[in-house]
Image (spheres, grey):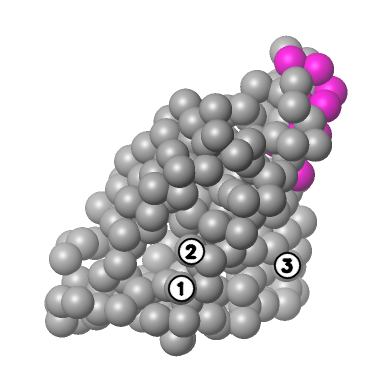
Amino acid sequence: MFIGHFVPAELLQLVAPNTPRWVALAGVSFPDLLWGGTVLAGVETVEWNRDSPLQKDIKFVKYPYSHSLVLATLIACIPGLGIGLWFGPAAGLVFIAASASHWLLDTIVHLHDLPILGFNRDKKVGFGLWRYGWVALLVEYAFFAIGTLLFVPRQSWTYVLVAGLILHMINLNSFIGLTKKNLIPSGKVYAALTFVGFGAAIWLFNAAY
Ligand SMILES: [Zn+2]
């Protein structure tokens, strides 16, 4: 999931309006940014599929640090604590809550590969909406659009909806498979692209209103 993750950031901004906007935006992005780093470092592993561009054909073999409910949220407390000390406790809590929301939303689309604890004998979850490419494509944007209408000031609706649509379309091939082969050559390249995608999203939505 990509733009859908930014709905909790919109909600948190409404609940804690005095928090700098980038805090919630960085919080919801944190697990995927961490994942980009751990995959590049070889700490977490992804099994890349050169013969399919679809999200459902990527195997997230091991990612307990970035994508478990318990361990990843504990790790998010480290930057959360720093942000809390610098910008006040509310900002720290916003960051941690935003990061935890990432796992919850990922459970909707991922295929039974998201660990709960992140250590020991663990259970994995994921409802697998990615199996239905077109549905997942439409549901994620609809969710983003509804969240935007509910939580974002009216004067920014057009900007946020258009920016979100452009970002969503970057992922189009991974939903519906316009190409037969995967245009992204490896998991490491994909991990590096995560920084570009989420970096662009944080920057665009931060400038929204
Ligand atoms: Zn994720």
Please state if 115 lies on the left or on the right of 202 as rendered.
right
Q: Which of marks 3 and 2 is in front?
A: 2
Above or below, 101 against 183 in this view is above
Distance from mark 1 CB to nearest ligand 1 atom below 8 Å: no
Counting from the top left corner in percent of width and height, residue 27 is at 63, 39
Seen at 70% across and 35% down, the residue is: 13
- Residue 196: quadrant of the picture: top left
The first of marks 3 and 2 along the sequence is 3
Q: Nearer the viewer, mark 3 or mark 1?
A: 1
In this view of the protein, which residue sits in the foreground, 102 or 8?
8
Name the residue type under label 1. Answer: Leu
Please state if 172 lies on the left or on the right of 106 as rendered.
left
The residue segment tinted magenta is 87-97
Secondary structure under tag 1 reads helix
Residue at which label 1 appears: 138
Does the magenta portion include 133?
Answer: no
Name the residue type under label 2. Answer: Tyr
Secondary structure under tag 3 reads loop
Distance from mark 2 CB to nearest ligand 1 atom below 8 Å: no
Counting from the top left corner in percent of width and height, residue 193 is at 31, 48
Seen at 25% across and 53% down, the residue is: 189
